[in-house]
Image (cartoon, rainbow, N blue to C red):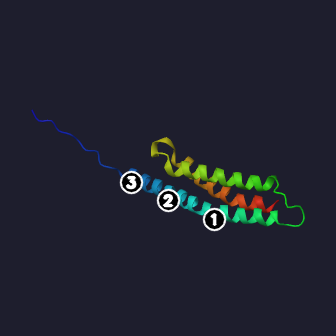
Amino acid sequence: MRTTTTVSSSTPEQTADRGALLALRLWALGGLGLLLGGYVVTVVIALTDAVDPADGVAGAYISAGFWSLHLSGLVGLAAAALPAGSMLRGVRCGAVVAQYVLLAAGPVLALMD
């Protein structure tokens, strides 16, 4: 008696989904790389505000800017590291967009102080 096994081949849709997933993960990892620059810019803004002769006190917007950067890192890490089956492609795409928006909001919020 011979038993045969079938090997499932990937369809073009599955290959395209893997390519889109890889692209989104690379965008998320790129945002994590840019996060270091966002922290440097926000720290420079905070230190410039600290030596300002007007008040020299870090306000709530500086804290909000740093929290925005923290959240950007968490969202980007989730978009890059979670397995493919745990997050839909649209949700992952939204997470990458949110990561970049939060990354840009950090220094902007710090400038408002």
The disc placed on residue 26 is: 2
Instruction: Residue at 81%, 52% (x, y): give it.
Output: 60
N-terminal of the two: label 2 or label 3? 3
Instruction: Residue at 61%, 62% (x, y): give it.
Output: 36
N-terminal of the two: label 1 or label 3? 3
Q: Disc 2 versus disc 3: distance between alpha carbons?
A: 17 Å
Instruction: Residue at 58%, 60% (x, y): give it.
Output: 31
Q: State the residue lying farthest toward the left.
A: 1
Q: Disc 2 versus disc 1: distance between alpha carbons?
A: 18 Å
x and y, in percent, of residue 102 in the image: 67, 55
Q: Choose between 12 and 2: the one closer to the eye.
A: 2
The disc placed on residue 37 is: 1
Question: Do we see residue 94 in this rendering?
Answer: no
Q: Above or below — where is 98 with respect to 111?
A: above
Q: State the residue lying farthest toward the top.
A: 1
User: Which amino acid, mark 3?
Assistant: Thr
Within 10 Å of the Cα at label 3, are there few (<14), some (14-19), or many (20+) other Cα atoms? few
x and y, in percent, of residue 5 in the image: 20, 40
The disc placed on residue 15 is: 3
